[in-house]
Amino acid sequence: LESRLRSLPKVELHQHVDGSIPAEVTWELMRHYRLNPVDRLDEMRRRLEIQEEEEGTLLAYLDKMHYPLWITQFYENISKVTEAIVDAAAAAGVTTLELRYSPVIHTFAGLTPRQSIRSVLSGMNHAQKRLPHLKLGLIVIAMRQHGPHIAKILARQAIAEAQHLHERTGVVGFDIAGPENGNPPRLFRSSYEIARIGQLGLTVHAGEAAPADYVWEAVDALGANRIGHGCSAAEDPELLRRLARDRIVVECCLSSNYHTGAVRRGAPHPIHAFLEAGVPVALCCDNTTVSRTDQQR
């Protein structure tokens, strides 16, 4: 059975660039720029991968993406790490891959948001040429803590690189991520309206570290047709019925939900409640490097 599962073609709909860069690639680039904080790859891995004693908080999980940001501020580096992520996914049997990426946090060395988006697309298109069977797309993320105005700017930048406007791999969706509490989805209504008019897919990180109300807002105020994580939705029977009725997909990231504490260790994952209620789900990796996983395990 395990062999058959490994050989199945797979779809990955929720995978972040920053948390999925192969450790060897980060290590190689850090050594090249003499930025490596430690002397051995195995020591570097401990700083890039969540450790058992660190599990249970979103802050500790997100801290693992601190070091990659040292090297992903430059166009060529971003393109290189993205190509490596696509290659790793293809090796795990993925045939459809949507990567998601926050352009603004990669602009500290001078890239514009548009250049930041193009750098990821460059890596994806380089990989596409070698792997023509792959179906690829990019989801642009606006970080909640940067505010609704930056989100509107990013929505417009995302549309400029929309896949349906170009004969190459491009942007297929728009998302918000980052700290949920205090940043409810309704504040980002304008950016999602821009993305909708631009014919981008709409997904929202919601219900990972906030109550089910945030998932309701993602659906009702933003028009999301996919929800990232959505763990708290399992606690609201009416919301489950709504997700099932409107065929709103929940992107379930099992490993990372336990790592971040969104789901308590030993507790059943909300995916069981979603399936029992008829809610469509997608099994996703979230951050393959941080969570020490891939699409085969």
Image (cartoon, grey):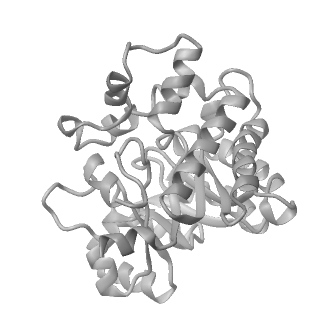
Residue farthest front in this picture: 3
Tell me the quadrant of the picture where the C terminus can be found: bottom left
- When asked about the image quadrant of residue 84, the answer is top right
Residue farthest top in this picture: 34
Q: Residue at x 23, y 41 (%)?
A: 55
Q: Residue at x 25, y 36 (%)?
A: 51
Q: Which of the two residues, 185 or 109, is positioned nearer the viewer here? A: 109
- When asked about the image quadrant of residue 193, the answer is bottom right
Residue 158 drawn above or below residue 48: below
Q: Which of the two residues, 73 or 183, is positioned nearer the viewer here? A: 73
Q: Is 257 situated left or right of 142 in this image?
A: left
Residue 4 drawn above or below residue 266: below
Q: Which of the two residues, 221 or 140, is positioned nearer the viewer here? A: 140
Q: Which of the two residues, 265 or 77, is positioned nearer the viewer here? A: 77
Q: At which x and y percent is residue 245?
A: 47, 89
Q: Is 176 situated left or right of 166 in this image?
A: left
Q: At which x and y percent is residue 65?
A: 45, 33
Q: At which x and y percent is residue 5?
A: 38, 72
Tell me the quadrant of the picture where the N terminus can be found: bottom left
Residue 66 drawn above or below residue 219: above
Q: Residue at x 23, y 35 (%)?
A: 54
Count numbered badges in the picture: 0
Q: Residue at x 70, y 44 (%)?
A: 123
